Amino acid sequence: MIYKRSSALFVEAQRVIPGGVNSPVRAFKSVGGDPIFVKEAKGAYLYDEDGRTLIDYINSWGPMILGHAYPPVVDAVVTKAQKGTSFGMPTEIETEIAKLAVSMVPSIDKIRFVNSGTEACMSAIRLARGFTNREKIIKFAGCYHGHSDSFLIQAGSGAVTFGSPNSPGVTKGTAKDTLLADYNNLDQIEALFKANPEEIAAIIVEPVAGNMGCIPPKNGFLEGLRSLCDQYNALLIFDEVMTGFRLAKGGVQELKGVQADIVTFGKVIGGGLPVGAFAARDEIMNYLAPLGPVYQAGTLSGNPLAMAAGLAMLTAIDTDKALFTRLEEKTAYLHKGMADALSNHTITHTINRIGSMISVHFAKDEVVDFKTAAAGDNDTFKKFFHGLLAEGIYIAPSAYESWFITDALTYEDLDTTIAAVAKVASTL
Ligand code: PLP
Protein backbone atom coordinates (compact mmCIF):
# COMPACT_ATOMS: atom_id res chain seq x y z
CA MET A 1 0.00 0.00 0.00
CA ILE A 2 1.75 3.16 -1.17
CA TYR A 3 -0.14 5.57 1.07
CA LYS A 4 0.38 3.63 4.29
CA ARG A 5 1.72 6.48 6.40
CA SER A 6 -0.75 9.06 5.01
CA SER A 7 -3.65 6.75 5.84
CA ALA A 8 -2.33 6.14 9.37
CA LEU A 9 -1.95 9.89 9.90
CA PHE A 10 -5.49 10.40 8.61
CA VAL A 11 -6.84 7.94 11.20
CA GLU A 12 -5.05 9.86 13.96
CA ALA A 13 -6.24 13.21 12.61
CA GLN A 14 -9.86 12.10 12.55
CA ARG A 15 -9.77 11.48 16.29
CA VAL A 16 -9.16 15.15 17.07
CA ILE A 17 -10.08 17.15 13.96
CA PRO A 18 -13.58 16.90 12.40
CA GLY A 19 -13.18 14.70 9.34
CA GLY A 20 -9.41 14.86 9.88
CA VAL A 21 -9.02 18.11 7.94
CA ASN A 22 -9.20 21.84 8.54
CA SER A 23 -10.95 22.55 5.22
CA PRO A 24 -13.43 20.05 3.75
CA VAL A 25 -12.18 19.63 0.15
CA ARG A 26 -8.88 18.26 1.50
CA ALA A 27 -10.68 15.12 2.71
CA PHE A 28 -11.06 13.58 -0.81
CA LYS A 29 -14.80 13.11 -0.21
CA SER A 30 -15.74 13.70 -3.83
CA VAL A 31 -13.07 11.37 -5.27
CA GLY A 32 -12.94 8.75 -2.50
CA GLY A 33 -9.91 7.35 -0.69
CA ASP A 34 -7.72 8.86 1.99
CA PRO A 35 -6.04 12.25 1.57
CA ILE A 36 -2.31 12.45 1.01
CA PHE A 37 -0.40 13.99 3.91
CA VAL A 38 2.34 16.30 2.71
CA LYS A 39 5.69 16.59 4.44
CA GLU A 40 7.30 19.38 2.49
CA ALA A 41 7.32 21.02 -0.90
CA LYS A 42 9.83 22.77 -3.11
CA GLY A 43 9.32 24.37 -6.52
CA ALA A 44 6.76 22.36 -8.48
CA TYR A 45 6.97 19.28 -6.26
CA LEU A 46 5.24 17.93 -3.18
CA TYR A 47 7.02 15.36 -1.00
CA ASP A 48 4.48 13.24 0.83
CA GLU A 49 4.68 11.31 4.09
CA ASP A 50 5.12 8.02 2.21
CA GLY A 51 8.29 9.20 0.50
CA ARG A 52 6.71 9.89 -2.90
CA THR A 53 7.30 12.95 -5.05
CA LEU A 54 4.26 14.49 -6.75
CA ILE A 55 4.07 17.17 -9.44
CA ASP A 56 1.71 19.73 -7.93
CA TYR A 57 -1.13 21.31 -9.92
CA ILE A 58 -2.96 22.75 -6.90
CA ASN A 59 -0.20 24.86 -5.44
CA SER A 60 -1.99 25.43 -2.15
CA TRP A 61 -5.13 26.29 -4.17
CA GLY A 62 -3.40 29.12 -5.96
CA PRO A 63 -0.91 31.09 -3.88
CA MET A 64 2.33 29.39 -4.99
CA ILE A 65 2.46 30.92 -8.46
CA LEU A 66 6.26 30.93 -8.36
CA GLY A 67 6.59 27.51 -6.75
CA HIS A 68 6.78 26.20 -3.21
CA ALA A 69 9.35 27.56 -0.75
CA TYR A 70 10.20 30.35 -3.19
CA PRO A 71 13.50 31.63 -1.74
CA PRO A 72 12.76 35.41 -1.64
CA VAL A 73 9.50 34.73 0.22
CA VAL A 74 11.13 32.29 2.65
CA ASP A 75 14.02 34.69 3.34
CA ALA A 76 11.64 37.61 3.91
CA VAL A 77 9.55 35.63 6.42
CA VAL A 78 12.56 34.23 8.31
CA THR A 79 14.17 37.66 8.60
CA LYS A 80 10.94 39.26 9.81
CA ALA A 81 10.15 36.50 12.31
CA GLN A 82 13.38 37.20 14.14
CA LYS A 83 12.14 40.72 14.86
CA GLY A 84 8.79 39.74 16.36
CA THR A 85 5.79 37.99 14.88
CA SER A 86 2.90 40.32 15.73
CA PHE A 87 2.49 43.72 17.38
CA GLY A 88 -1.09 44.87 16.80
CA MET A 89 0.43 48.27 15.95
CA PRO A 90 1.10 49.92 12.60
CA THR A 91 4.27 48.87 10.76
CA GLU A 92 6.00 50.44 7.76
CA ILE A 93 5.81 47.26 5.70
CA GLU A 94 1.98 47.51 5.58
CA THR A 95 2.30 50.79 3.70
CA GLU A 96 4.99 49.36 1.42
CA ILE A 97 2.87 46.43 0.26
CA ALA A 98 -0.24 48.65 0.05
CA LYS A 99 1.60 51.11 -2.23
CA LEU A 100 2.83 48.31 -4.43
CA ALA A 101 -0.58 46.64 -4.71
CA VAL A 102 -2.28 49.97 -5.49
CA SER A 103 0.31 50.64 -8.21
CA MET A 104 -0.24 47.23 -9.82
CA VAL A 105 -4.04 47.06 -9.85
CA PRO A 106 -6.34 49.37 -11.88
CA SER A 107 -9.11 51.39 -10.20
CA ILE A 108 -7.97 51.17 -6.57
CA ASP A 109 -6.67 53.97 -4.34
CA LYS A 110 -6.65 52.22 -0.98
CA ILE A 111 -6.44 48.65 0.26
CA ARG A 112 -7.19 47.03 3.63
CA PHE A 113 -5.48 43.77 4.61
CA VAL A 114 -7.29 40.92 6.35
CA ASN A 115 -6.42 37.27 7.01
CA SER A 116 -8.27 35.30 4.34
CA GLY A 117 -10.24 35.54 1.13
CA THR A 118 -13.41 34.84 3.13
CA GLU A 119 -12.81 37.87 5.32
CA ALA A 120 -12.03 40.00 2.29
CA CYS A 121 -15.31 39.13 0.54
CA MET A 122 -17.36 39.36 3.72
CA SER A 123 -15.95 42.81 4.45
CA ALA A 124 -16.39 43.94 0.83
CA ILE A 125 -20.10 43.11 1.03
CA ARG A 126 -20.52 45.00 4.30
CA LEU A 127 -18.73 47.98 2.80
CA ALA A 128 -20.93 47.86 -0.32
CA ARG A 129 -24.07 47.70 1.81
CA GLY A 130 -22.89 50.56 3.99
CA PHE A 131 -21.88 52.70 1.02
CA THR A 132 -25.08 52.19 -0.96
CA ASN A 133 -27.43 51.93 2.02
CA ARG A 134 -29.00 48.86 0.37
CA GLU A 135 -29.20 45.28 1.62
CA LYS A 136 -29.38 42.74 -1.20
CA ILE A 137 -26.49 41.29 -3.15
CA ILE A 138 -26.34 39.17 -6.29
CA LYS A 139 -24.00 36.21 -6.55
CA PHE A 140 -23.63 33.54 -9.22
CA ALA A 141 -24.39 29.84 -8.73
CA GLY A 142 -21.07 27.98 -8.57
CA CYS A 143 -18.98 31.04 -7.67
CA TYR A 144 -17.31 30.74 -4.27
CA HIS A 145 -16.53 33.74 -2.13
CA GLY A 146 -15.53 32.01 1.09
CA HIS A 147 -17.62 30.53 3.85
CA SER A 148 -19.35 33.55 5.36
CA ASP A 149 -23.13 33.27 5.72
CA SER A 150 -24.19 35.56 2.86
CA PHE A 151 -22.36 33.37 0.34
CA LEU A 152 -23.47 29.91 1.48
CA ILE A 153 -26.63 30.25 -0.50
CA GLN A 154 -28.05 28.09 -3.26
CA ALA A 155 -30.65 28.84 -5.89
CA GLY A 156 -34.24 28.66 -4.69
CA SER A 157 -37.08 27.14 -6.71
CA GLY A 158 -36.42 29.14 -9.89
CA ALA A 159 -33.08 30.36 -11.15
CA VAL A 160 -34.02 34.03 -10.86
CA THR A 161 -35.27 34.04 -7.31
CA PHE A 162 -34.22 34.46 -3.73
CA GLY A 163 -31.63 32.02 -2.48
CA SER A 164 -31.98 29.49 0.29
CA PRO A 165 -29.29 28.45 2.80
CA ASN A 166 -27.04 25.62 1.61
CA SER A 167 -25.61 24.92 5.04
CA PRO A 168 -27.40 24.46 8.33
CA GLY A 169 -26.55 27.45 10.47
CA VAL A 170 -27.18 29.99 7.73
CA THR A 171 -30.43 31.73 8.55
CA LYS A 172 -33.32 32.21 6.13
CA GLY A 173 -33.10 35.90 7.01
CA THR A 174 -29.56 36.05 5.63
CA ALA A 175 -30.48 33.99 2.58
CA LYS A 176 -33.26 36.34 1.56
CA ASP A 177 -30.71 39.09 0.92
CA THR A 178 -28.63 37.01 -1.51
CA LEU A 179 -30.03 36.71 -5.02
CA LEU A 180 -28.73 34.04 -7.37
CA ALA A 181 -28.08 33.97 -11.10
CA ASP A 182 -26.30 31.68 -13.55
CA TYR A 183 -22.75 32.61 -14.53
CA ASN A 184 -22.44 34.21 -17.96
CA ASN A 185 -26.16 35.03 -18.01
CA LEU A 186 -26.81 38.76 -18.28
CA ASP A 187 -30.55 38.37 -18.91
CA GLN A 188 -31.02 36.96 -15.42
CA ILE A 189 -29.10 39.86 -13.89
CA GLU A 190 -31.25 42.34 -15.73
CA ALA A 191 -34.38 40.54 -14.49
CA LEU A 192 -33.10 40.66 -10.90
CA PHE A 193 -32.44 44.39 -11.15
CA LYS A 194 -35.86 45.00 -12.67
CA ALA A 195 -37.51 43.08 -9.84
CA ASN A 196 -35.44 44.86 -7.13
CA PRO A 197 -34.55 48.22 -8.71
CA GLU A 198 -33.45 50.06 -5.56
CA GLU A 199 -32.49 47.22 -3.26
CA ILE A 200 -29.34 45.73 -4.74
CA ALA A 201 -26.14 46.96 -3.12
CA ALA A 202 -23.73 44.96 -5.25
CA ILE A 203 -23.02 42.13 -7.62
CA ILE A 204 -20.13 39.94 -6.49
CA VAL A 205 -18.52 37.85 -9.20
CA GLU A 206 -15.41 35.81 -9.86
CA PRO A 207 -14.47 37.65 -13.07
CA VAL A 208 -12.92 34.37 -14.20
CA ALA A 209 -14.62 31.60 -12.28
CA GLY A 210 -12.36 29.02 -10.68
CA ASN A 211 -14.68 27.18 -8.33
CA MET A 212 -16.65 25.14 -10.89
CA GLY A 213 -13.51 24.29 -12.80
CA CYS A 214 -12.08 27.20 -14.72
CA ILE A 215 -14.79 29.17 -16.52
CA PRO A 216 -13.79 32.34 -18.34
CA PRO A 217 -16.42 35.06 -18.81
CA LYS A 218 -18.12 35.11 -22.21
CA ASN A 219 -17.40 38.14 -24.37
CA GLY A 220 -19.45 41.05 -23.09
CA PHE A 221 -20.42 39.43 -19.77
CA LEU A 222 -18.23 41.57 -17.50
CA GLU A 223 -18.97 44.68 -19.56
CA GLY A 224 -22.69 43.92 -19.23
CA LEU A 225 -22.40 43.58 -15.44
CA ARG A 226 -20.57 46.90 -15.35
CA SER A 227 -23.25 48.74 -17.29
CA LEU A 228 -26.16 47.19 -15.37
CA CYS A 229 -24.51 48.17 -12.07
CA ASP A 230 -24.08 51.71 -13.39
CA GLN A 231 -27.67 51.82 -14.56
CA TYR A 232 -29.06 50.68 -11.19
CA ASN A 233 -26.50 52.46 -8.96
CA ALA A 234 -25.15 49.20 -7.55
CA LEU A 235 -21.49 48.39 -6.96
CA LEU A 236 -19.60 45.78 -8.95
CA ILE A 237 -17.33 43.63 -6.79
CA PHE A 238 -14.70 41.52 -8.52
CA ASP A 239 -13.62 38.64 -6.32
CA GLU A 240 -10.03 38.33 -7.53
CA VAL A 241 -8.98 36.05 -4.66
CA MET A 242 -7.92 33.47 -7.27
CA THR A 243 -7.22 35.66 -10.25
CA GLY A 244 -5.54 38.67 -8.64
CA PHE A 245 -1.81 38.85 -9.45
CA ARG A 246 -2.26 35.51 -11.29
CA LEU A 247 -3.88 36.28 -14.63
CA ALA A 248 -2.11 39.63 -14.98
CA LYS A 249 -0.36 42.06 -12.66
CA GLY A 250 -3.64 43.91 -12.34
CA GLY A 251 -5.82 40.78 -12.43
CA VAL A 252 -8.91 40.43 -14.61
CA GLN A 253 -9.60 44.17 -14.51
CA GLU A 254 -6.39 44.63 -16.49
CA LEU A 255 -6.82 41.51 -18.62
CA LYS A 256 -10.36 42.32 -19.75
CA GLY A 257 -10.30 46.12 -19.41
CA VAL A 258 -13.37 46.22 -17.17
CA GLN A 259 -13.19 48.15 -13.90
CA ALA A 260 -14.82 47.03 -10.69
CA ASP A 261 -15.84 49.24 -7.75
CA ILE A 262 -14.42 46.94 -5.09
CA VAL A 263 -11.83 44.20 -5.62
CA THR A 264 -11.03 41.38 -3.21
CA PHE A 265 -7.76 39.49 -2.99
CA GLY A 266 -6.30 36.43 -1.27
CA LYS A 267 -3.97 33.57 -2.20
CA VAL A 268 -1.08 35.08 -4.28
CA ILE A 269 -1.14 38.40 -2.37
CA GLY A 270 0.00 36.55 0.77
CA GLY A 271 2.76 34.50 -0.82
CA GLY A 272 1.40 31.41 0.98
CA LEU A 273 0.73 33.05 4.35
CA PRO A 274 -2.82 33.75 5.56
CA VAL A 275 -3.66 37.05 3.85
CA GLY A 276 -6.67 38.57 2.15
CA ALA A 277 -7.38 42.15 1.16
CA PHE A 278 -10.08 44.35 -0.29
CA ALA A 279 -9.58 47.56 -2.18
CA ALA A 280 -11.49 50.33 -3.93
CA ARG A 281 -11.34 53.99 -4.86
CA ASP A 282 -10.99 56.57 -2.04
CA GLU A 283 -14.65 57.48 -1.90
CA ILE A 284 -15.62 53.90 -1.04
CA MET A 285 -12.65 52.94 1.16
CA ASN A 286 -13.08 56.10 3.27
CA TYR A 287 -16.38 54.61 4.46
CA LEU A 288 -14.36 52.15 6.56
CA ALA A 289 -13.59 52.61 10.26
CA PRO A 290 -11.74 54.51 11.64
CA LEU A 291 -12.48 57.10 8.90
CA GLY A 292 -16.05 56.11 8.18
CA PRO A 293 -19.00 54.29 9.74
CA VAL A 294 -18.52 50.74 8.38
CA TYR A 295 -16.79 48.61 11.01
CA GLN A 296 -14.07 46.11 10.12
CA ALA A 297 -11.05 45.00 12.16
CA GLY A 298 -8.53 42.20 12.92
CA THR A 299 -6.01 41.41 15.68
CA LEU A 300 -3.62 39.82 13.20
CA SER A 301 -4.52 41.91 10.13
CA GLY A 302 -1.40 43.29 8.46
CA ASN A 303 0.67 40.75 10.36
CA PRO A 304 4.38 41.39 9.72
CA LEU A 305 5.23 37.86 8.54
CA ALA A 306 2.26 37.83 6.17
CA MET A 307 3.12 41.31 4.86
CA ALA A 308 6.77 40.30 4.35
CA ALA A 309 5.73 37.21 2.36
CA GLY A 310 3.22 39.20 0.33
CA LEU A 311 5.64 42.02 -0.39
CA ALA A 312 8.33 39.60 -1.57
CA MET A 313 5.78 37.82 -3.79
CA LEU A 314 4.28 40.97 -5.33
CA THR A 315 7.75 42.45 -5.88
CA ALA A 316 8.81 39.32 -7.77
CA ILE A 317 5.66 39.46 -9.91
CA ASP A 318 5.96 43.19 -10.53
CA THR A 319 9.55 42.98 -11.70
CA ASP A 320 9.35 39.86 -13.89
CA LYS A 321 8.14 41.24 -17.22
CA ALA A 322 7.92 37.82 -18.89
CA LEU A 323 6.14 35.92 -16.10
CA PHE A 324 2.60 35.98 -17.44
CA THR A 325 3.71 35.06 -20.96
CA ARG A 326 5.72 32.13 -19.61
CA LEU A 327 2.79 30.91 -17.51
CA GLU A 328 0.39 31.22 -20.44
CA GLU A 329 2.75 29.28 -22.74
CA LYS A 330 3.22 26.48 -20.23
CA THR A 331 -0.53 26.22 -19.68
CA ALA A 332 -1.23 26.21 -23.43
CA TYR A 333 1.39 23.45 -23.89
CA LEU A 334 -0.25 21.35 -21.19
CA HIS A 335 -3.69 22.02 -22.69
CA LYS A 336 -2.65 20.81 -26.13
CA GLY A 337 -0.83 17.75 -24.78
CA MET A 338 -3.75 16.68 -22.60
CA ALA A 339 -6.35 17.36 -25.30
CA ASP A 340 -4.40 15.23 -27.79
CA ALA A 341 -3.92 12.43 -25.26
CA LEU A 342 -7.62 12.33 -24.33
CA SER A 343 -8.78 12.62 -27.96
CA ASN A 344 -6.42 9.82 -29.06
CA HIS A 345 -8.27 7.58 -26.63
CA THR A 346 -11.68 8.98 -27.69
CA ILE A 347 -12.42 10.28 -24.20
CA THR A 348 -15.22 12.87 -24.27
CA HIS A 349 -13.85 15.99 -22.67
CA THR A 350 -13.79 19.79 -22.61
CA ILE A 351 -10.74 21.70 -21.42
CA ASN A 352 -11.17 25.29 -20.25
CA ARG A 353 -8.16 27.55 -19.95
CA ILE A 354 -7.21 31.16 -19.41
CA GLY A 355 -3.73 32.33 -18.44
CA SER A 356 -2.39 29.92 -15.82
CA MET A 357 -5.78 28.46 -14.88
CA ILE A 358 -7.02 25.29 -16.56
CA SER A 359 -9.53 22.52 -15.91
CA VAL A 360 -10.46 19.22 -17.53
CA HIS A 361 -14.19 18.42 -17.69
CA PHE A 362 -15.50 15.05 -18.83
CA ALA A 363 -18.41 16.79 -20.50
CA LYS A 364 -19.29 16.91 -24.17
CA ASP A 365 -20.71 20.44 -24.26
CA GLU A 366 -19.08 23.77 -23.59
CA VAL A 367 -18.71 24.41 -19.85
CA VAL A 368 -19.94 27.96 -19.20
CA ASP A 369 -21.72 27.85 -15.84
CA PHE A 370 -22.47 25.62 -12.87
CA LYS A 371 -25.08 23.52 -14.68
CA THR A 372 -22.83 22.71 -17.60
CA ALA A 373 -19.93 21.99 -15.21
CA ALA A 374 -22.17 19.64 -13.21
CA ALA A 375 -23.02 17.77 -16.44
CA GLY A 376 -19.47 16.37 -16.45
CA ASP A 377 -19.02 12.65 -15.72
CA ASN A 378 -17.84 12.47 -12.12
CA ASP A 379 -17.01 8.75 -12.22
CA THR A 380 -14.57 9.36 -15.04
CA PHE A 381 -13.11 12.29 -13.10
CA LYS A 382 -12.56 10.06 -10.04
CA LYS A 383 -10.70 7.48 -12.14
CA PHE A 384 -8.70 10.24 -13.82
CA PHE A 385 -7.78 11.74 -10.45
CA HIS A 386 -6.66 8.46 -8.87
CA GLY A 387 -4.90 7.35 -12.05
CA LEU A 388 -2.87 10.56 -12.14
CA LEU A 389 -2.12 10.32 -8.43
CA ALA A 390 -0.70 6.84 -8.93
CA GLU A 391 1.51 8.34 -11.66
CA GLY A 392 2.78 11.05 -9.28
CA ILE A 393 0.58 13.89 -10.55
CA TYR A 394 -1.46 15.78 -7.96
CA ILE A 395 -4.55 17.60 -9.25
CA ALA A 396 -7.42 18.97 -7.16
CA PRO A 397 -9.52 16.19 -5.58
CA SER A 398 -12.72 17.58 -7.09
CA ALA A 399 -14.05 18.10 -10.60
CA TYR A 400 -15.15 21.60 -9.58
CA GLU A 401 -11.72 23.10 -9.08
CA SER A 402 -9.34 24.90 -11.36
CA TRP A 403 -5.76 23.69 -11.66
CA PHE A 404 -3.09 26.32 -10.99
CA ILE A 405 0.04 26.35 -13.10
CA THR A 406 3.21 27.48 -11.37
CA ASP A 407 6.23 29.03 -13.00
CA ALA A 408 8.35 26.39 -11.27
CA LEU A 409 7.00 23.72 -13.65
CA THR A 410 9.49 22.76 -16.36
CA TYR A 411 8.57 21.51 -19.83
CA GLU A 412 9.93 18.15 -18.69
CA ASP A 413 7.36 18.17 -15.87
CA LEU A 414 4.65 19.05 -18.38
CA ASP A 415 5.75 16.19 -20.67
CA THR A 416 5.71 13.80 -17.71
CA THR A 417 2.18 14.98 -16.92
CA ILE A 418 0.99 14.62 -20.52
CA ALA A 419 2.45 11.08 -20.68
CA ALA A 420 0.63 10.25 -17.44
CA VAL A 421 -2.63 11.64 -18.86
CA ALA A 422 -2.17 9.46 -21.97
CA LYS A 423 -1.53 6.38 -19.81
CA VAL A 424 -4.56 7.06 -17.59
CA ALA A 425 -6.73 7.89 -20.63
CA SER A 426 -6.07 4.38 -21.96
CA THR A 427 -7.73 2.98 -18.81
CA LEU A 428 -10.81 5.23 -18.71
N1 PLP B 1 -12.99 33.79 -3.25
C1 PLP B 1 -12.55 32.90 -4.13
C2 PLP B 1 -12.72 33.18 -5.59
C3 PLP B 1 -11.93 31.73 -3.71
O1 PLP B 1 -11.51 30.85 -4.62
C4 PLP B 1 -11.76 31.51 -2.32
C5 PLP B 1 -11.11 30.29 -1.84
O2 PLP B 1 -10.82 29.37 -2.55
C6 PLP B 1 -12.24 32.47 -1.43
C7 PLP B 1 -12.85 33.60 -1.92
C8 PLP B 1 -12.10 32.27 0.04
O3 PLP B 1 -10.76 32.43 0.40
P1 PLP B 1 -10.19 31.74 1.73
O4 PLP B 1 -10.23 30.28 1.53
O5 PLP B 1 -8.81 32.32 1.86
O6 PLP B 1 -11.06 32.19 2.86
Image (tube, rainbow, N blue to C red):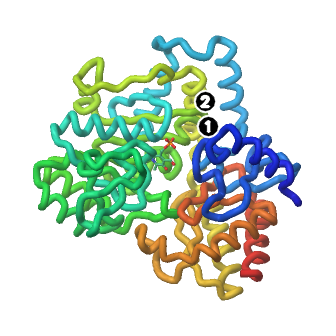
Residue plotted at (69% across, 67% down): 385
Q: How many marks can you see?
A: 2
Label 1 environment density (alpha carbons within 10 Å; few <14, some 14–19, many ≥20): many
Residue 150 pos. (x, y %):
34, 46
The circle drawn on residue 376 is none
Could you tell me residue 413's position as x and y percent?
A: 77, 60
User: In the picture, residue 287 is in which quadrant?
Assistant: top left
Which residue is labeled 1 in the image? Answer: 272
Numbered badge on residue 309? 2
Give the residue displayed 60% in from the left and 59% down from the top.
403
Residue extending farthest front:
15
Q: Residue 53: where, in percent of width, then height?
A: 83, 53
Name the amino acid, label 1. Gly
* Kind of residue at badge 2: Ala
Task: Tell me if label 2 and label 1 are in contact, CB under 8 Å.
Answer: yes
Please determine whether, in this image, residue 287 is positioned above or below residue 133.
Answer: above
Mark toward the start of the polypeptide (2 vs 1): 1
Q: In the figure, residue 294 lies in which quadrant?
A: top left
Judge by depth and name the residue closer to the eye, 26 or 234.
26
Using the image, determine if residue 402 lies above or below residue 274.
Answer: below
Tell me which residue sits at (26%, 69%) in the image.
158
- Mark 2 element type: helix
Residue 75 visible in rendering: yes
Does label 1 point to a residue whose CB lies under 8 Å from ligand 1?
Answer: no
Percent coordinates x, y for residue 182 in the rendering: 33, 66
| Location of the C terminus (image quadrant) | bottom right
